[in-house]
Image (cartoon, rainbow, N blue to C red):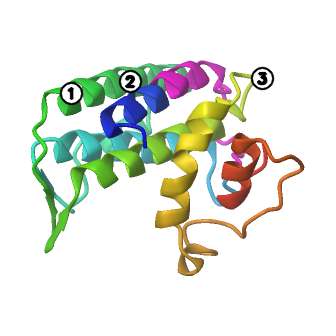
Amino acid sequence: MTEPVALLERAVSYTRGALQSAGDDPSAPTPCSEWNLGRLLEHMSDALDAFIEASAGVVDIHPRAGCGGDAAGPVGARVEALRCKACDLLGAWSAAGTRNVRLADADLDPGLLLRAGALEIAVHGHDVAATGPPGPALPEPLARDLLPTARLLVTPGDRGVRFGPQLRPATSAPSAVLLGFLGRTQ
């Protein structure tokens, strides 16, 4: 199995490139039918803040300051801020120890948390890239390495709440299987 920080680095690398394909319209639809581009960028910013915070060993479950400010700017500025935060995330976790991360009353395994972060970052990178001109495809080796995490973390109870129904992909390519499992198409 891929080492978690290395997997996170690959997801961040892909997503930093995919962000360059973002459309200019914050109201543009994304592969997540409930979210437009502006809302997705805001969510990504908040998630990156939480993953950076987790590198210190604890995640505050209260809304993060600054997340709303990201929603007001033009898409290009918001994308650039995300690209910078992604680099900060890698730096934080490269320097972090291997202790568990405290979230409310739970202790989270940092390896699983990093795998979940890599999954979220890569899939949302795909979603952002779908709003503009064709961008880089989700790399097959990355998708293959993220699929076990998706299968572990996404349960039937998540369908209709955080994920759409599982879709049957047109091919057996790992990216098609991963995206289909998460209710998306390529």
Left or right position of 108 against 175: left
Local packing at callout 1 (Cα closer than 10 Å; few below 14, some 14-19, many 20+) is few
**Residue 50 place in picture, x, y as percent:** 26, 47
Residue at 68% of width from left, 67% of height from top?
Answer: 164
Marks 1, 2: nearer the viewer: 1
- Residue positioned 55% across, 67% down in the render: 162
Q: Which residues are magenta?
A: 13-31
For label 1, the residue is 94
Q: What SS does tag 2 mark?
A: helix
- Name the quadrant containing residue 26: top right
Label 2 CA crowd tier, 10 Å (few <14, some 14–19, many 20+): some
Residue at mark 2 = 81
Kind of residue indicated by mark 2: Ala
Disc 1 residue type?
Answer: Ser
Numbered mark located on residue 134 in the image: 3
Report x, y in % for residue 132. Answer: 73, 27
Instruction: Please indicate, yes or no, whether residue 112 appears anywhere in the rendered image.
Output: yes
Image: 64 above or below 20: below
Q: Is residue 10 above or below residue 69?
A: above
**72 lies left or right of 178:** left
Q: Is residue 7 above or below residue 155?
A: above
Classify residue 129 as left or right of residue 70: right
Q: Is residue 58 above or below residue 124?
A: below
Q: Viewer-proximal residue, 56 or 85?
A: 56
- Give the mark nearest the N terminus, 1 or 2: 2
- Under circle 1, the secondary element is helix
Q: Which mark sits nearer the N-terminus, 3 or 1? A: 1
The quarter of the picture where residue 52 lies is top left
